[in-house]
Amino acid sequence: MLLSAILCTSNRGALLARALESILGQTLEPKDFEVIVIDDGSTDDTRQIVESFERRFHLRYAYQSNAGLASAKNHGIYCSRAPIVLFLDDDEVFSPALFEEHLKAHRTHPEDHYAVLGYTGLHPSIADKPLMDFVTEVGCYLFSYPDVRDGALLDYTYFWGGRTSCKRTFLIQHGVFNPVFRFGCEDIELGYRLSKHNLQVKYNARAISTMIRDISFDAFCARLARQGRSQQVFSRLHPEAEVQRWCEVPGAEEKWQKTAPVYNAMLRSARELDRIANLKLELGLDLDDVTKTLLHQAYHNAFEACKLKGIWEQKTATRAETGEKRLVVRDIYRRSASR
Amino acid sequence: MNQSVLVVGVYLLDRPSYVIPITIELDKARCWQVEQRWVALGTGRIPDEVAKVTVRTAIPPGMKFMLLNQLLAQVDIDRHEFILVCDDDIVLPSGFLDRYLELVRRHEFALAQPARTHESFIDHPFVEQLDGLVARWTRFVEIGPFFSVHRTAFALLFPFDEASPMGWGYDFFWPSIIADAGLKMGIVDATPVAHSFRKPVSYYELGSSRRDMERFLSQRSHLSPDEAFYIVESYAS
């Protein structure tokens, strides 16, 4: 067994089926990999879908009551048996060479502290959507590949969940995800802690996955508000300046005070421009440059506002309101054991 | 079925501890007859609240697992369904013992521990509570601050091997002997205990325990951390 692919999912049975289907085509021998599906409290047909793939490759299904992404990923790490763990998203399909490409990069960098980042593109069915194009190619709110060249050695801010692999032993030795994060920042926060142990991320553009889920404007706004809340938590865990900068927390309060009065109008305006842009495309009309510029500016303003709102909400909310159970800096007092 | 459990533990007399609330909480069990036998370490006065369960004082403080062996040698352990080994610096959730042992029995864990709360000092992240789970069948159970041994494993684990008198290394050796005997070990996530009162290894010498562990493990078949920190099966209910 060379690689354990960890797929955390929650109520996305139909998408998960497509993800698992694409694993059937992996060029890596089935005996050399396993897939761990962590079902984070699904109430749909996720279990049945996973069971339909049993006996096609090594597949392990584990259910947990809904606990969020960080807990689910930790569950997956501890269920895995291979020396390399690859974190995948349940709303993507995977190129046939994905597993092999991750392994190749690890063979080139066998030291424990090297992780590998693959490339994620958009499925043709969603690539033309103005919002999806903006969040991957322009504003880079979802992925940020335009400035990364193949083979680059990157820092912890590229330890992106859902498309990164690393040595299991590195996590076992130096730390796993902080369960305080239910969505967002769990990957970068772990990366930050691992950076203290020399984590480096190698980008391999030939390790390709493809996102297949279209995200609506309102869903993306909600996503960014959650991201903002996680950034606020991340910033409280680590007071260091570089983390504060990454989390965009300094000055956020003042920015939100200015934004709050126009927040609803900002979102309304961006939502309407998004609707018009999609309508034009459906009618076979191109988006002219002026419309594009306006649209991108509107998206940018709306998404920044959503993040600020999330940061502010998390900062001002009580523990009871956020459901936050703990905020603990992982601090390991290790009794080393012989290997 | 035998419904009796024996709690053995050591507490510090010269330092603050939670021994009083721990013993009170364990005595609240409704499904079990609980016998407690504790050793007081040091020279302070034994608190009235734990006088009845304190069977001896050790001056100067001795090695934990040697003291536990002495405690266990004084009783007929076969009268008990479980032996529970408890430190003096944890906070048990209310109703702990009934719920914990219910889950240990349901999942047939011969050797088990409650997970540590998120706020606890953590030696091994593997034992931190996994949210969303009730319990997991594992290849690792820590030597403290709390673990339980079912009678099916008494002969395997007792008396404790005094080659590592502070217990370091047991937790990488135990999985081998538990698995060889066809038994299960596990962690109960639904009843996490808080271990945040004192940093581990605050009051004894780290280097000698580490040397003991290295010597202990070098002479025995054991698991590496990679092998040990593995969930064989997880249970969400």
Image: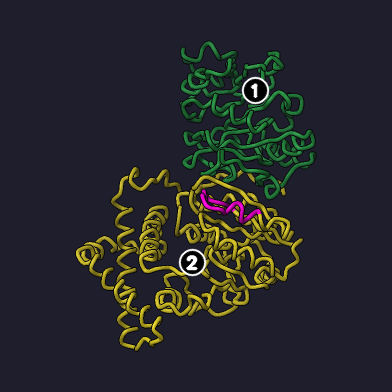
| Residue A7 picture location, percent across and down | 59, 58
Residue B18: x %, y % from top left: 47, 25
Residue A255 location, x and y as percent? 25, 65
**Marks 2 and 1, how far apart in space?**
48 Å
Query: Does the stretch in magenta take in A47?
Result: yes
Task: Tell me the element at label 2.
Answer: helix
Chain given the colour yellow? A
> Percent from the top left, x then y, of residue B57?
58, 16
Secondary structure at numbered mark 1? strand
Q: Nearer the viewer, residue B48 or A133?
A: A133
Outermost residue, left side = A261
Chain B pictured colour: green
Viewer-nearest residue: B165 or B139 = B139
* Relative horizontal placement of residue B52, taking residue A280 as reference (left or right): right
**Range of magenta residues:** A38-51
Image quadrant assignment for residue A96: bottom right
Note whether A322 is above or below B20 in the view shown: below
| Residue that badge 2 annotates | A157
Subunit that carries the residue with mark 2: A
For residue B14, above or below residue A64 = above
